Image: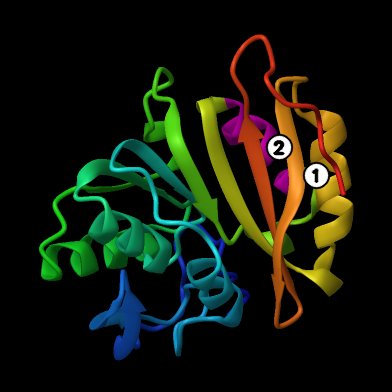
Amino acid sequence: MGDHYFSEAPSSIDKPRRIRIPIAGRDVEVTTNAGVFSPDRLDTGTRVLLANTPAPPAGGDFLDIGCGWGPISLDMASASPHARVWAVDVNERALDLVRANAAELGLDNVVAVRPDEVPAGVLFRTIRSNPPIRVGKAVLHDLMESWLPRLEERSDAYLVVKRDLGSDSLQRWLGAALPEDFSVRRHATAKGYRIIKVRRHGSPRTAPIDVV
């Protein structure tokens, strides 16, 4: 078919399926489908991210870059019901799944939209993402430079990337590319994945750049 999980309108035939996943400390059933990332199960990278990051803030605007069918967005929305979670993807089928899964779980604080539908003035209290590495380095770097500078001051982003898909080189690039009030470090390692923590400090910066 030539579909990728980052295709805007997957041409693969609908094959909805139900799977069980852990969300904010409880197991729930959600719907996935062909033509989106990891339709058969919760992928290992996302499991590592959910298991090795702190609880999100109590409120504010959150961001999930490349949300797929929504596990990270659903987890944040469930853990922080007073927050607004922006679930962002270019894949329309994925966005439909996020909306349906959020509605089924009673999570009315998830906003599933295309990137250009997020208002320009919105800043984020946290960003959590299993970013779409296979889009290529140039597109990935553009995504990071577009979204990470929209962290609020004294706020954190957590990105999970497989080691053999360039986690260490991405970490080094982020340390060099982001403005000086950002720090970048390795937060955790598990099952062949790295979690990269990006923090935006106050202005003037209250901590040094930390690239490990």
Do we see residue 20 in this rendering?
Answer: yes
Question: In 3D space, how far apart are the residues under numbered discs 1 and 2 (Cα atoms)?
Answer: 6 Å
Tell me if 64 is positioned left or right of 52 in this view: left
> Measuring 59% from the left and 18% from the top, which residue is drawn there?
202
Do we see residue 32 in this rendering?
Answer: no
Q: Nearer the viewer, residue 188 or 91?
A: 188
The residue carrying mark 1 is 138
The secondary structure that most of the magenta stretch takes on is helix
> Measuring 51% from the left and 52% from the top, which residue is drawn there?
128
For this orientation, the residue located farthest to the top is 204
> Measuring 58% from the left and 62% from the top, which residue is drawn there?
130
| Residue 211 percent location from the top left of the image | 85, 42
| Residue 61 percent location from the top left of the image | 34, 35
Question: Disc 1 residue type?
Answer: Ala
Contact, mark 1 vs mark 2 (Cβ under 8 Å): yes
Question: Disc 2 residue type?
Answer: Asp
